[in-house]
Image (cartoon, helix red, strand yellow):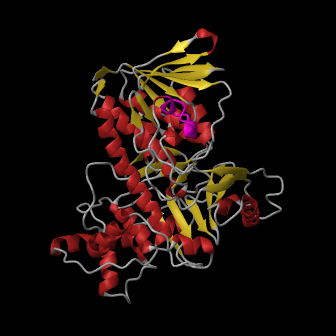
């Protein structure tokens, strides 16, 4: 099979559809892209916490970040702040790394080794302040750390609307009737009302859990995975005190029956209470959620109850259809992997389409690479629950005693012996989280490593990096008044540093 690709039809116009269009339009400018949506399009509108790949892709497409942030109610995100995940009363910090390098032995690795060598001078509690300059700026002072690699909190519905206006070369097709036609394991076209028909060389299914295209040509096989949580109750929470509540990070606060996310936008807080239906009813979850923010504050605030599909596709590319976004799968809101998964999928697809064709090997290669990425997401998320010392409810007793994939258990054994590094990680696919992210999370649970032999020159470089971090100025920007100018993988230019 040899299939030239000059045209792509994306069905579904939520954030997944428009982000896929953005990536393909940027990196495959030869493509004729059509985006098809029903007129009664009603996207879920979640996924407001992102990773640094979003602003980088926006910049690559020529988007003015300042204009984007105003239009999409966006604020800067420096990382994720975790409270009460290991024991009630503790916290840990997962920033977008402020270190100039990652690899086999960084300042983060060295600090963990120093905990073993001199625990009176080095502790897990001090790790974040000593390794990441962003900890003091973001967590202690509630300011943006410009030296960090940053992401955004965005209104997902406004994101889709902005990209619709920006992507003027993408043909938008609206119809009351949108029906995919499957023939011999492929999509032959999209039937629309009024006798219209749309066709393309390749189709992208961004129809969410409905999988309206892929379901026409295949019975999707899911990856085996036991979800930690499967329900949420979410709302737009009004600000009470913006000065303290508009923090430059996503907050994940663990509770007896689950956890709450808080994502501060310019005009409101996107928030939700995440739980497992086996241990908490929707009614109890809503009561817990309203009580968390205060009943008076939440009196007139409507909430939405959301059910997460458990299955993630083993083969998101089948025939001439590629599933992206919720159509490909979902793990849970933790670590903001939803939009990152979409962008990673679209990035990979763009690389496959660069030669302007695909062949019979392309789907298998794409699917294998995406499985590696998904397994990395699943393992990273699972570790947050598995390693917890909490046993104060049936929810936590279940999370800390249930079977987990052998892959994760083996990974943790290797990490204990060698620490996470660029040598003990698979290099055939893009990692969802690098080795420093693993160190940051594992530190929050007091994860125990063994002493390792480190060449003197590596040790010296790591010690120098810790000294530089200690001496570095902690400049900050008020998240209420920021204006991004440019972002890169290792820092951001903003106005108003203090």
**Magenta span contains residue 211:** yes
Direction from residue 75 to residue 245 in the image, left or right: right
Viewer-closest of 395 and 174: 395
Residue 261 horizontal/vertical position (percent): 61, 59
Any part of residue 96 in sight = no
Per the rendered image, the range of residues in magenta is 206-216
- Front in this rendered view, residue 494 or 109: 109
x 72%, y 56%: residue: 239
Q: Is residue 12 above or below residue 254?
A: above
Q: Is residue 120 visible?
A: yes
Q: Is residue 226 left or right of residue 290?
A: left
Work out which quarter of the rendered image holds the N terminus and state it. Answer: top left
Residue 253 sits in quarter: bottom right
Magenta stretch containing residue 285, yes or no? no
Q: Residue at x 31, y 21 (%)?
A: 3
Q: From the top left corner, tell me how far across and down residue 288 is, in percent.
A: 73, 65
Q: Is residue 468 above or below residue 283?
A: below
Q: Position of residue 344 (x, y in %)?
A: 40, 43
């Amino acid at each position: 099979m040899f299939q030239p690709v000059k045209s792509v039809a994306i069905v579904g116009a939520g954030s997944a559809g428009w982000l896929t269009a953005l990536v393909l339009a940027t990196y495959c400018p030869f493509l004729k892209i059509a985006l098809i949506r029903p007129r009664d399009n009603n996207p879920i509108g979640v996924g407001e916490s992102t990773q640094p790949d979003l602003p980088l892709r926006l910049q690559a497409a020529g988007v003015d970040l300042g204009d984007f942030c105003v239009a999409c109610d966006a604020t800067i995100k420096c990382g994720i702040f975790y409270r009460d995940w290991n024991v009630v009363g503790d916290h840990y910090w997962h920033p977008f790394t402020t270190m100039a390098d990652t690899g086999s032995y960084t300042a983060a690795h060295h600090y963990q080794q120093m905990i073993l060598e001199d625990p009176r001078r080095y502790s897990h509690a001090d790790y974040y302040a000593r390794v990441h300059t962003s900890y003091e700026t973001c967590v202690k002072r509630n300011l943006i750390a410009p030296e960090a690699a940053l992401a955004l909190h965005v209104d997902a519905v406004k994101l889709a609307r902005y990209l619709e206006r920006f992507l003027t070369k993408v043909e938008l097709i609206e119809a009351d009737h949108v029906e995919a036609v499957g023939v011999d394991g492929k999509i032959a076209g999209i039937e629309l009302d009024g006798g219209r028909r749309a066709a393309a060389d390749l189709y992208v299914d961004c129809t969410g859990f409905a999988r309206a295209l892929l379901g026409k040509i295949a019975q999707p096989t899911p990856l085996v995975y036991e979800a930690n949580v499967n329900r949420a109750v979410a709302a737009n929470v009004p600000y009470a005190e913006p000065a303290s509540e508009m923090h430059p990070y996503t907050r994940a606060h663990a509770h007896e029956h689950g956890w709450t996310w808080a994502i501060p936008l310019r005009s409101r807080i996107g928030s939700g209470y995440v739980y497992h239906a086996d241990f908490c009813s929707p009614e109890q979850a809503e009561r817990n959620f309203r009580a968390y923010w205060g009943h008076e504050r939440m009196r007139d605030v409507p909430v939405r109850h959301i059910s997460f599909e458990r299955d993630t596709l083993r083969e998101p590319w089948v025939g001439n259809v590629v599933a992206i976004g919720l159509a490909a799968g979902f793990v849970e809101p933790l670590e903001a992997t939803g939009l990152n998964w979409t962008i990673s999928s679209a990035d990979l697809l763009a690389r496959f389409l660069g030669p302007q064709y695909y062949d019979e090997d392309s789907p298998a290669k794409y699917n294998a690479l995406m499985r590696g990425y998904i397994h990395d997401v699943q393992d990273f998320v699972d570790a947050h629950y598995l390693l917890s010392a909490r046993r104060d409810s049936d929810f936590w007793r279940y999370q800390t005693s249930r079977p987990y994939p052998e892959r994760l258990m083996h990974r943790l054994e290797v990490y204990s012996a060698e620490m996470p590094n660029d040598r003990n990680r698979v290099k055939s696919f893009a990692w969802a989280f690098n080795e420093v992210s693993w160190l940051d999370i594992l530190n929050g649970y007091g994860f125990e490593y063994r002493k390792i032999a480190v060449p003197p020159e590596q040790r010296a470089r790591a010690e120098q990096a810790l000294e530089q971090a200690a001496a570095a100025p902690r400049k900050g920007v008020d998240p209420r008044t920021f204006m991004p100018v440019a972002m890169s993988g290792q820092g951001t230019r903003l106005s108003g540093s203090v």
